[in-house]
Amino acid sequence: MNIHLLSFGFNYAGTPYELAGCEPDARRFNRRLSPYCASSTLVTGMGTKRRPCENVDDMLSIARKVRHRLDEGDLMVITQSSHGTWEKTSDTSESSGGNQGIVAPDFSVLWDDRLAAECADRAKGSFIFSIIDCCHPGSIQRGGLACCGRKRGIPLDRCKATRHVPTGLQM
């Protein structure tokens, strides 16, 4: 079994919603866990060494590259420290009554259903474990994956306008 680590951390520097600890948290997760991993990728608000990470599409592109390394029995560990947000929904598949999301550096939102669909597309017999450190982490990642949360976040009306399209996929 190989372990592949992906650590995200966004501080939103220079914005009214600037944080101080998320990028250092991601660096600490990466530094402490990477000795046990076959590969490790650190992504901060400035991106990786090779490319910037500015929005949801950048986040997913980087995650796909790590996820495609998975073989049967492998584990992908995702750590994420940033703002989170929540929106009320009438979708009955949402047991919490709303959609939770991770806020990207440009304030676009990676909604829980989209993340679940992305995580479902992986090698048979591989696993994804996540540690989500933001507001409203409860169902951002489904399937009994680990979460830890903060008590402050960005109101949804401050995030970039995005249209959430439920996939119906539940992990």
Image: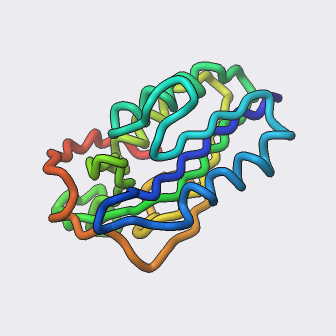
Residue 131 image point, x, y percent: 60, 56
Eyeballing the image, is 48 above or below 102?
A: above
Residue 52 image point, x, y percent: 43, 32
Eyeballing the image, is 159 above or below 53?
A: below
* Residue drawn at x 30%, y 61% as measured from the top left: 15
Q: How many marks?
A: 0
Residue 109 image point, x, y percent: 29, 49
Nearer the observer, 13 or 118: 13
* Residue drawn at x 68%, y 38% as measured from the top left: 5
Which colour assignment does the render follow? Answer: rainbow
* Residue drawn at x 74%, y 29% as measured from the top left: 39
114 with respect to 45 (left or right): left
Nearer the observer, 103 or 170: 103
Nearer the observer, 154 or 119: 154
The furthest residue to the front? 14
* Residue drawn at x 47%, y 65% as measured from the top left: 134
**Quadrant where the N terminus is found in the figure:** top right
97 with respect to 103 (left or right): left
115 with respect to 133 (left or right): left
Residue 33 image point, x, y percent: 78, 47
The furthest residue to the bottom? 151
